[in-house]
Image: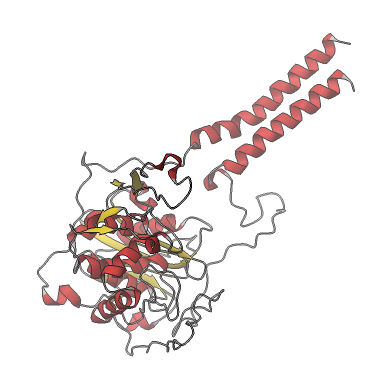
Amino acid sequence: MRIREVGLRAACLLGAAVTVTALAGAPAFAVPATDGPPVGGSSTTTTPPFTTPNTDDCPQKTQPPAPIDTSEVPAPGEPTPTQLPVPSPAIGGQRMGDCGVLVPDGAPPVPAEISATAWMVSDLDTGRVLAAKDPHGRYRPASTIKVALAIVALRSLDLDKVVVGTQADADVDGTRVGIGPGGRYTNRQLMQALIMCSGNDAAHAIATQLGGDKAAVAKMNEVAKSLRALDTRAATPSGLDGPGMSTSAYDLSVLFREAMNIPLFAELIHTEQVDFPGFPADPKIPDDNFDKADHPGFPIANDNQLLYNYAGAIGGKTGFTDDARQTFVAAAERDGHRLVVTLLKADVRPIRPWEQAARLLDYGFALDTDARIGKLPESGSEAVQPSVPLASPPPRADGTQADPVRPAHQGARIATLIGGPVLILVLLLWARRAFRRRR
């Protein structure tokens, strides 16, 4: 084979490998979405165009969409939960009984690129509902139901009590913060793991102190009922899908607003990172931690990207299961107003859930200060003590918003994407010169 051919092939192969590697590891925003054909050409993608789900006909008026797996099949001997009654008139006002997109009279169109099947924007302090889509439609909450567990736990557990981790904690399904058997954790640390990192192992350890999963779920459902969140029924403490699990965008706003009456909840949703304890090595497990030393502690970080990337973000709670899809509840403050946004059955297309939440928050902040289409109920602690203000999260240490968190190696990936084609050109020129020297 000629030297020229060798050089050209080597250059092309190396350049292609560099570019493919960069594209494979690049963050989602580095590669344009392929939801439609490009301008001036035809698309080769097989991905169907994105469309926001239509709820005008109230498809989820009585129950969530059909599950895609067996997670909601009752255990042998357990009854199948009946459908929750649909209140009439709708809680929150007449328009809250509608199922399509709802905005105040004269308001501009809602933002594009919102994939959430149901959503709502409301005022955290006054309870005014500013805009919504299918507000009382019933969907699965995933880990956002941990807000209800947090309300129960923060009002009933001794936060300084030390709890010893168990194998049952460590073996739970889904997201785990890293509780290990024999580890010693205060309830405050368990709440950090629950709220900041959505740890199902933390949810299990908390539920155990509340009397077990069934008892904890019963207490969560009692809280929901007392708040008139009547679309809500917890089936598991953690938010893993289970028989009868249900909530709505309206109810999730109600639960979050109630949780914000608890100062520690407001503090934890606003906390970016804390240290979490380790746990002892297990002598019964061969090579556990290799040298039999204790598993060291480690930092845990808040998994809510809105907290890092949105000016005025207060904090919130994320969630995901295969049946629920992406769920989200969060709050932000601007010009003295604090708004809450909830998303149910969302997807990461065309933009991520926290970005959809940011769009809706911007929309809500831009509306007139007296805009409203409904109202959150005056119930729970607010009804008992209406003069008690909702808790405010503490400011960051320097009094400013943190810089947006960027994906690891983002700069290197972008540099590679730009440098890959340049490298190809340089290698081609080198090969051409080498060929000319050897002719």
Q: Is residue 180 left or right of residue 59?
A: left
- Outermost residue, top side: 437
Q: Quadrant of residue 379?
A: bottom left
Q: Which residue appears at 62% of the width and 62% of the height?
A: 49
Q: Residue at x 71, y 29 (%)?
A: 14
Quarter of the N terminus within the rendering: top right
Quadrant where the C terminus is found in the figure: top right
Q: Position of residue 104 (x, y in %)?
A: 34, 71
Q: Could one spot residue 163 in this view of the protein?
A: yes
Whether residue 373 is situated above or below residue 48 in the rendered picture: below
Q: In the picture provided, is 187 more to the left or to the right than 217?
A: left
377 on left or right of 251 = left
Q: How many marks?
A: 0
Q: How is the image coloured?
A: secondary structure
Residue 46 in which image quadrant: bottom right
The location of residue 165, given as percent across then percent down, is 32, 58
Residue at image x 80%, y 18%?
Answer: 432
Q: From where the camera sits, is residue 371 visible?
A: no
The answer to whether residue 281 is left or right of residue 275 is: right
State the residue at coordinates (52%, 46%): 29
Query: Depth check: 175 or 91 in front?
Result: 175
Image quadrant in which you'd find residue 7: top right
Q: Position of residue 300 (x, y in %)?
A: 34, 48
Q: Position of residue 101 (x, y in %)?
A: 43, 73
Residue toward you, 277 or 36: 277
Compared with 135, 15 (above or below) is: above
